[in-house]
Image: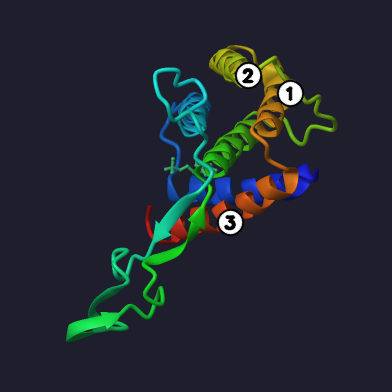
């Protein structure tokens, strides 16, 4: 596990965001990043679904089709490439399948949380943690609850940061992710985050 690489990318992204969205006087960015992390954690729990005892579908959302944005998932349209033809043609962008690929919403949400976790570390000048003790509760629900609890308290007790990091890595393992998958998804999201800034997000 090489945290340095991700940490360096995070620093570059955060510096860019700071330039594009300068801090207002007195703005508490730690509080905002902390809330953002809690929001991502909630969204992650929603993609995991394992706590939804009221539903027959408690399976994690690990596969979701990405529909072709050119034909709206139809596989055909009244165009050839970008040119309007007036008669139905097979979409050349998805080869008529209507589908551009598959994504893993559970992993993507996990990685969004990791972004904010790194960003909080940078905000507080914590630097790279030399060693992370991966922590795991008895079950995933308890792991989420422990994370919500400790993250909510983080602005008042930043010394909990390494413990939270260990809990977050522990959660990743419990959700079945390898570090390689996490890294790959982080790099992909990094490109998207920069594109968003290019496009005035
Ligand atoms: O200072 C910041 C602000 C945002 N993000 C990234 C983390 C997530 O990948 C993404 C969340 O964006 P939304 O989709 O929630 O808008 O932005 C950072 O890395 N640093």
State the SS at label 2. Answer: helix
In the picture, the disc for residue 52 is: none
Quadrant where the N terminus sits is top right
Across and down, in percent, residue 84 comes to 20, 84
Answer above or below: position of 121 versus 13. Answer: above
Mark 1 vs mark 2: in front: 2
CB of mark 1 near ligand 1 (< 8 Å): no
The residue labelled by disc 3 is 188
Q: Is residue 91 left or right of residue 78?
A: right
5 or 95, nearer to the observer: 95
Measured Cα–Cα span from mark 1 to mark 3: 25 Å
Q: Is residue 14 left or right of residue 43?
A: right
The residue lying at 40 percent from left, 24 percent from top is 55
The residue lying at 52 percent from left, 39 percent from top is 109
Across and down, in percent, residue 10 comes to 63, 46
State the SS at label 3. Answer: helix
State the SS at label 1. Answer: helix
N-terminal of the two: label 1 or label 2? 2
Q: Is residue 58 left or right of residue 87?
A: right
Q: Where on the picture, by quarter, is residue 117?
A: top right
Mark 1 vs mark 3: in front: 3
The residue labelled by disc 1 is 162
Q: Where on the picture, by quarter, is residue 70?
A: bottom left
Q: Name the colouring of the figure.
A: rainbow
Across and down, in percent, residue 47 comes to 48, 34
In the picture, the disc for residue 143 is: 2
74 or 17, nearer to the observer: 74
């Amino acid at each position: 596990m090489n945290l340095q690489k991700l940490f360096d990318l995070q620093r570059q992204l955060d510096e860019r965001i700071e330039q594009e969205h300068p801090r207002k006087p007195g703005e508490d960015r730690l509080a905002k990043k902390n809330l953002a992390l809690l929001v991502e954690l909630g969204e992650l729990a929603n993609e995991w679904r394992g706590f939804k005892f009221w539903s027959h579908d408690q399976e994690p959302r690990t596969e979701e089709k990405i529909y072709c944005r050119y034909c709206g998932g139809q596989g055909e349209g009244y165009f050839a490439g970008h040119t309007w033809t007036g008669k139905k043609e097979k979409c050349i962008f998805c080869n008529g399948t209507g589908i551009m690929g598959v994504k893993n919403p559970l992993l993507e949400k996990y990685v969004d949380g990791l972004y904010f976790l790194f960003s909080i570390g940078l905000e507080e000048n914590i630097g790279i943690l030399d060693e992370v003790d991966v922590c795991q509760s008895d079950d995933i629900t308890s792991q989420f609850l422990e994370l919500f609890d400790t993250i909510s308290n983080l602005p008042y007790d930043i010394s909990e940061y390494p413990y939270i990091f260990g809990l977050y890595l522990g959660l990743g393992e419990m959700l079945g992710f390898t570090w390689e998958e996490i890294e790959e998804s982080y790099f992909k999201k990094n490109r998207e985050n920069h594109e968003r800034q290019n496009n005035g997000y």
